[in-house]
Structures are given as structure tokens and as C-alpha cells.
Image (cartoon, rainbow, N blue to C red):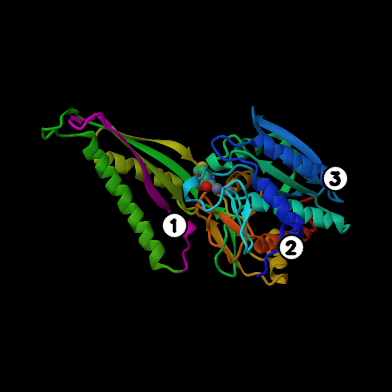
Amino acid sequence: MTTKGPESEHPSVTLFRQYLRICTMQPNPDYGGAITFLEERARQLGLSCQKIEVVPGYVITVLTWPGTNPSLPSILLNSHTDVVPVFKEHWHHDPFEAFKDSEGYIYARGAQDMKSVSIQYLEAVRRLKSEGHRFPRTIHMTFVPDEEVGGHKGMELFVKRPEFQALRAGFALDEGLANPTDAFTVFYSERSPWWVRVTSTGKPGHASRFIEDTAVEKLHKVISSILAFREKEMQRLQANPRLKEGAVTSVNLTKLEGGVAFNVVPATMSASFDFRVAPDVDMKAFEKQLQSWCQEAGEGVTFEFAQKFTEPRMTPIDDTDPWWAAFSGACKEMNLTLEPEIFPAATDSRYIRAVGIPALGFSPMNRTPVLLHDHNERLHEAVFLRGVDIYTRLLSALASVPALPGES
Ligand SMILES: CSCC[C@H](NC=O)C(=O)O
Ligand SMILES: [Zn+2]
Ligand SMILES: [Zn+2]
């Protein structure tokens, strides 16, 4: 591909790179900078801009393009403004410079997750507006904080607010993942994060002795049970090529804490696990399973949750569903191949679905390696620009879905 000089760069790419330069990295995101940028976009696009502070310092920004039939439920385009931390020494370019190499790859934290999508929404709306289109359904673009640390000060609170109800969302789009093949992945559900800390207590003493009933011995038993379960789920995934990662439950041991000295047997030890529970799992039974793994290990072994989501939902993906028909129909017209899957991690879609709004996770990045949260996160400008084209068609289709039975 020939390299274009900066003077010939597509304005959507320039805007994308400007947004990437705002350092909204956790744990100290420059949310103010992002909001100022979005307010300016609203002004330029002639859209109204609402700001809803759900917790002091945590603002949801909503840009609205009214439809011609405001009595119809709206289309919600959600994206989060925060990004995850970087290990700067592993990057080939400054992660907040949005460097574009001679081939057209844009390197930046947030290039895939998910500042690309935010700008693609905005640029698709800009294009449709400038071409003079109007659609029956209102389109709201929500820009939310806090997603990367769980959304507890973002979307989780927002969906319970009257301002959210007032948007009257009938259908939502949120983030997905890149796909290295020619196809595009679309997510109709997601696994539920369960962060579990197991704490074991036992007899302390001098570390030169064979002390019985130690905290470590019992914790070791729990770890073995959970890692055996991990192995079983992994085998189940590997044995069935039809199963994708999101369809089984995963777990990783992510923290071990305890101990005071080499020669002191500690009275307490803990292990932290990141479970991602598949949406078809009976959650009550699964919690009982956790309980029995702890009980079987002996006295004084307990567990607590640092994160527990229990309301997974599936967005319909059969052709009789009008939203899916509009989404997949528009993709078909563009000759895009879709691969519907369950999102393996967690996004704000889980809160949207849990209040009864169908949502699809979709980030239009094909022929792109999955680099979210990774070093050298990058996106090719051509893939980015094609994404704007794709949203242009998708929004036209979704915002034109006629009144559904029961909608007025
Ligand atoms: C479970 S709260 C943290 C949410 C986070 N989301 C994106 O990576 C994730 O770890 O899935
Ligand atoms: Zn994300
Ligand atoms: Zn992320």
C-alpha cells in the first residue's frame, strides 16, 4: 500500500488519532479531556449533548440525533472512554502519540478497545447527516467511564437512572473483538465475571516442624479442585471444535497472599480466582460447587466475592428477530461474514442486557489480530475507515426498523 502524507490523511483518521492522544488510562483517566472532545464533536455535528454525573467525577456523555418518529424506542450506541494501563517499555511507539507507520497502522492504547468504535459511530452519524438522511428512530451515542474496572461507577449505575429510561433504548450496540480472518465476530451474550477470594486458616508454628492442619495445606486442596475443574473445561473446549472460548467456564488463579517469614507457618493464606462463568451455567449450583470445594478442604476455609454478576442474558440471533434481521441483513448486503459468539470477558453490554435491552457486541475489525489490553495495540487506517462505512449501513438499517409489535 502506498503511504499517504499527513496532508492527505482522511479527516476521520485524523479525528481518531486526536481522540487516542487523550490519556484516559486507568487508574487516572483524563475524563475531562474526553468530555471536552465529545462536546466539541456534538457542536460540530449539531447534536444535543447531555452530561449525567452518576458518581462525583464520573460523567456519562450522551449525544443525540433525534429520529422523525420520536415515539419509537431508540438505538443506543455505547462506548467506554477509559483504556487499560500500558507497559511502556514494550511498545514500539508512545502509546498516547497515535503514531501511524508507513504502512498505515495506528499504534495506541485504545486503538482497538475501543476509541476506534467511538469515532466510527460519530463519523457514521456525521456522514448520514451530511447526506441529508433522516431515520424514524432516534440514535443516542453514550460515552461512559469506568468500564475497564467493572463499570460500577459507569454503566452499572447509569442503567438504573431516570435519564437512562428517558433514552427509551430499544436496541444497543457495544464493543466486540477484532477477528484475524476475513470474517467479523459479533457477540450476543457474555460470560459472567466471578472474582473469588478463598481464605484458609489453620495452625501456625515453627516452620521446622511437621505442623498439622495448616492454612496452606487446605488452600492447596481448594486450588487443586479448582485447577482440576479448569482442566476439565479446557478439555471440553478443545474436544469440540464447535465450541468457542465463551461457551465454557474459564478460571485462573491470579493472586496468592499470605505469610510473614520463612520460618513461620502462617495462620492464614488466601488465593484469588478470576472465573468467567458461561451463560448457560446454573449459577446457584455453581456457587454450591465452590462451597463444597472449600468444605472438602477442611475446617476454616471460606470464600468471598470481589465481583459477581448473576444476570447473563442472550440477545436473540434468529432471523425472526427484527433487530438481528436488520443487523445481519445489512451485513449480508455488504458481503460481510459474521461469526456469532459469546464474549469471553465482560463489557458494559451485560448491564444493558440485564435491564431487558437487546445488545450486540461488535467492533468492525476483520483481518486484525486481537490486541486489546496487549502491547502495541494497533489498527490499520483502512480497517478503521471501512468500519465507518459499515456503521453507516448498520445505522441506516437499525434506525429504520419499523415499529415492533407492542412498540408505539
Ligand atoms: C469484571 S470487571 C472488569 C471488566 C473487564 N472488561 C474488559 O476487559 C474484564 O476483565 O472483563
Ligand atoms: Zn473495552
Ligand atoms: Zn478493555
Residue 231: quarter of image: bottom left
Q: Secondary structure at mark 3?
A: loop
Q: Position of residue 284 (x, y in %)?
A: 43, 44
* Residue placed under numbered mark 2 in the picture: 389
Where does the magenta region start and end? 242-268
Whether residue 257 is visible? yes
Compared with 24, 334 (above or below) is: below
Whether residue 171 is visible? no
Residue 56: quarter of image: top right
* Residue placed under numbered mark 1 in the picture: 248
Mark 2 Cα shell of 10 Å, populated few (<14), some (14-19), many (≥20): some
Per the rendering, the mark at residue 110 is none
**Residue type, mark 2 in image:** Asp
**If you read the primary sequence from the N terminus, does the residue marked by circle 2 or circle 1 appear first?**
1
Answer with left or right where residue 224 lies relative to residue 204.
right
* Residue placed under numbered mark 3 in the picture: 46
